[in-house]
Image (spheres, grey):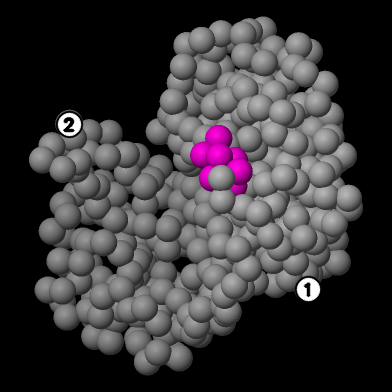
Amino acid sequence: MNNLPALFSEHIKQRMNNAAEALIALNYRSLILGAGEPFTYFTDDANAVFRPNPHFAHWCPAKGAHHVIKYEPGKKPLLVYYAPDDFWHYHEPFINPFWAQEFEVIEVNSIDKIWSQLGDLSFSVFIGNETKYAAVHNVRINCELMTSRLNWYRRYKSNYEIYCISEANKLAAKGHIAAKNSFLDGASEYEIHMTYLQAMDCVDSDLPYTGIVALNKNGAILHYHNREITKNGKVLLIDSGASFNNYPSDITRTYTQNKVVNDFQDLLIQSEKMQLELCSQVKTGLYFPDLHTQCHLKIAEILENIGVLKIAGDYETAVNEGITKVFLPHGLGHMLGIQVHDIGGKQLDVQGNPAPKNSKNIFSSLRFVGTLEQNMVVTIEPGIYFIPILLNNFRSNSSYADKINWNLVERLIPFGGIRIEDNVVVQGYSQRNLTREFLP
């Protein structure tokens, strides 16, 4: 069992060192991070589900809104913890959490008292959405140069963060195993989703993102969030994660019933093999778009193997002419951290300059365009889909339409698609697959 307080102590020291570097570079005295305030839906008095400012959450796993951290180099971080006397809403009580010793903590029961506890705010910079309080105190608000630096630092995960993402994978694996069994028993999307939640003892609002539970053709809708009650699907694509101390897992699996046609079964077997091969290539120094390109080349080969493509081994043309993008329109993966789509993946440097764009069409949806480095965490999530909109457009407008076996495609469309996704951390010239430790 890892020593969570010790891991967090190391983590917060890294945050302090990074913040001090940024404050010196930008001539600020202190950094102020707000957990944020809830917001309501338009013309409604109902709050949306609250998610903390990720920059605050990067420093502190405290639940709830309105808390504020102030950090000034050379001093212990100050946490003003909002604990109101409120019988309308639940607020997490402050009962010596494992991370408390890393902060000087002041509890207040009123929002109006928070900023009065922060002391001297001259030459301070505030990152958050409660800007009205910062404006009153003449604090610099959401400085882009500061957020660029904080985004850059978040690319590199501490041991504490890796532990939390691992625990989130462990928890989500319970849900995925239960969901698979529910699917094999003939359950509907709704029933599968409820089984997933029950296996993890959680509710929807505990999840890091709205999960995808898609049977059959619904798997070809990339962000499918419906929950149909039709039972006995032939294919299940489930993309769902879990959270641990604000850190998410992001996992996808595709399962089939025995009654699925052999071509789709073969496609799934080859896709699973490809995904593991791509995961095994994650290492320090790998330019992630190159791995994305390898993925597309492999997809061209797989599609030819099962008879969907008629390209005589010319996989590069299949990639360069956009044939494979019809079947894989999204990126191979993204950075994973305090946010599911963690930030900093398109930055060139700590100053926030954008990474150069690649003009090739296959890179248009890629969220991480940098080089892998030690302790970065990425998702590896190749997919092959049969999306009618994309297929019909390609068939009508591309000179390469004759390279596709449309009769076979028509037989595969009812099964939607395939995606397999793991969370992988870079460890030198190797990697650690945080997902496969708990889920085949």
Q: Nearer the viewer, residue 382 or 91?
A: 382
Q: Nearer the viewer, residue 53 or 101?
A: 53
Amino acid on which the number 2 mark rests in the picture: Trp
Residue 88 badge:
2
Left or right of 380? Residue 45 is left
Range covered by the magenta-colored residues = 388-395
Q: CA distance from mark 2 to mark 1?
A: 52 Å
Q: Which residue is mark 1?
A: 285
Q: Residues within 10 Å of mark 1 (few under 14, many from 20)?
A: some
Q: Residue at x 57, y 75 (%)?
A: 357
Q: Quadrant of residue 239?
A: top right
Provide residue 433's location: percent of width, then percent of height. 77, 48
Q: Nearer the viewer, residue 383 or 75?
A: 383
Is the residue 25 above or below the residue 240 in the image?
Answer: below
**Quick one: label 2 or label 1, which is nearer the N terminus?**
2
Q: Is residue 144 visible?
A: yes
Amino acid on which the number 1 mark rests in the picture: Gly
Q: Is residue 393 magenta?
A: yes
Provide residue 130's location: percent of width, then percent of height. 22, 61
Q: Quadrant where the N terminus lies?
A: top right
Q: Residue at x 46, y 51 (%)?
A: 61
Left or right of 11? Residue 143 is left
Q: Quadrant of residue 139?
A: bottom left
Residue 382 badge:
none
Q: Quadrant where the C terminus lies?
A: top right
Provide residue 45's location: percent of width, then percent of height. 13, 37
